[in-house]
């Protein structure tokens, strides 16, 4: 029903405009008729003068058509008829010229009103389109924020794909050659699929960054809490300690929760295999705070580059 309303309005506007145009044409035709009446009246009123021309008398047999004793009365009658036509024609010209002018004004006013309405509708449509674009932009941002939030709350290995993964690798490349171990908290996360997927992905991106990743799959016992530990020996060099802080900052930027943990000599000896190199950074993976399990990467649109 709403789609029919504009068409109905357009039809009504066209009908009104056609009526105005028809009325204006009627007045113009009557104006033309009055002008013709004036011309004919002038010709009839001056018939005596025209008939006095020699070449007219040659072709018009006045003596036969009009006796001489009736010529003067005929001239008076035709002059009156001519004057009557002139008076009626001039009066009609004045009347219908005014009406034609008025009809032209009506047409112009109606056309202006249509133009104003069209401009108003166009402005309204542009405003509605602008509002729709703004709403679409807001919804798009909300959808993007929601998507980001879903990824952040989901399995942590997904944070290391796409642009996040590229930026993570780029931030760690200046420290290439740094030794690092990726261990999961034992035995709490031994069969945790989310932690296993994160461990695998972390080892891959650290290798891409040029870090020296410990090849043995190892665990870390005696850990408590959630998220990630970035561990460094209490005997580590300042360079290794600074790199551990840089790694933690890169994890936070994903964003992935984590904390810096300093290993004591006792902590290092009781691990299997032991933490023998004091300059090796150890990443300990604890349970995710959302207790999520890993899902296929292609299950969340837009995660892969």
Image (cartoon, grey):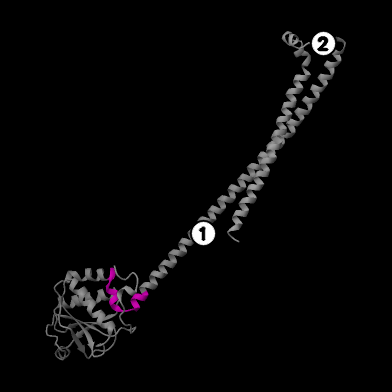
The answer to whether residue 181 is above or below residue 33 is: below
Name the quadrant of the N terminus. bottom right
Q: Nearer the viewer, residue 235 or 63?
A: 63
- Crowding at label 1, few (<14), some or many (≥20) Cα neighbours within 10 Å? few
Q: SS of the residue at dot 1?
A: helix
> For mark 1, what is the residue?
128
The answer to whether residue 223 is above or below residue 239 is: below
- Mark 2–mark 1 distance (CA, rounded to whole Å): 86 Å
The percent coordinates of residue 209 (x first, y second) are 19, 71
The magenta stretch is 149-164
Does the segment drawn in magenta span residue 222? no
The percent coordinates of residue 78 (x first, y second) are 82, 19
The answer to whether residue 149 is above or below residue 117 is: below
The percent coordinates of residue 107 (x first, y second) are 65, 42
Instruction: Answer with left or right where residue 298 lies relative to residue 21.
Output: left
Q: SS of the residue at dot 2?
A: helix
Name the residue rendered at 63%, 49% in the picture: 13
> For mark 2, what is the residue?
64
Name the residue rendered at 22%, 75% in the picture: 247
Hey, which quadrant is residue 84 in on the image? top right
Instruction: Answer with left or right where residue 13 lies relative to residue 92.
Output: left
Chief secondary structure of the magenta portion: helix
The percent coordinates of residue 98 (x first, y second) are 71, 35
The label number, if any, that marks residue 255 in the structure image: none
- Crowding at label 2, few (<14), some or many (≥20) Cα neighbours within 10 Å? few
Q: Earlier in the sequence, mark 2 or mark 1?
A: 2
Name the quadrant of the C terminus. bottom left
């Amino acid at each position: 029903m709403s789609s029919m309303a504009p068409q109905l309005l357009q039809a009504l506007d066209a009908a009104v405009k056609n009526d105005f145009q028809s009325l204006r044409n009627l007045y113009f035709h009557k104006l033309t008729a009055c002008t013709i009446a004036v011309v004919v009246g002038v010709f009839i009123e001056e018939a005596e003068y025209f008939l006095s021309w020699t070449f007219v008398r040659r072709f018009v047999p006045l003596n036969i058509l009009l006796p001489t004793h009736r010529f003067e009365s005929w001239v008076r009658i035709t002059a009156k008829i001519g004057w009557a036509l002139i008076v009626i024609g001039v009066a009609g010209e004045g009347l219908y010229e005014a009406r034609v002018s008025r009809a032209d004004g009506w047409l112009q006013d109606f056309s202006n009103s249509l133009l104003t309405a069209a401009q108003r509708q166009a402005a309204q449509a542009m405003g509605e389109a602008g509002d729709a674009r703004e709403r679409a932009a807001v919804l798009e941002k909300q959808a993007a924020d929601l998507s980001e939030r879903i990824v952040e709350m989901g399995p942590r290995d997904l944070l290391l794909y796409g642009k996040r993964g590229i930026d993570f690798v780029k931030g760690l490349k200046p420290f290439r050659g740094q030794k690092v171990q990726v261990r999961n908290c034992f035995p709490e996360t031994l069969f945790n699929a989310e932690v296993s997927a994160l461990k695998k992905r972390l080892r891959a991106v650290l290798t891409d960054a040029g870090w020296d990743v410990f090849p043995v799959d190892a665990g870390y016992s005696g850990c408590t809490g959630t998220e990630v530990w970035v561990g460094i020996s209490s005997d580590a060099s300042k360079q290794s300690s600074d790199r551990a802080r840089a790694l933690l900052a890169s994890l936070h930027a994903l964003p992935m929760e984590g904390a810096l943990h300093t290993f004591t000599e006792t902590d290092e000896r009781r691990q299997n295999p032991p933490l023998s190199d004091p300059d090796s950074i150890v990443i300990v993976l604890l349970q995710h705070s959302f207790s999520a399990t890993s899902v296929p990467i292609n299950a969340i649109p837009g995660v892969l580059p």
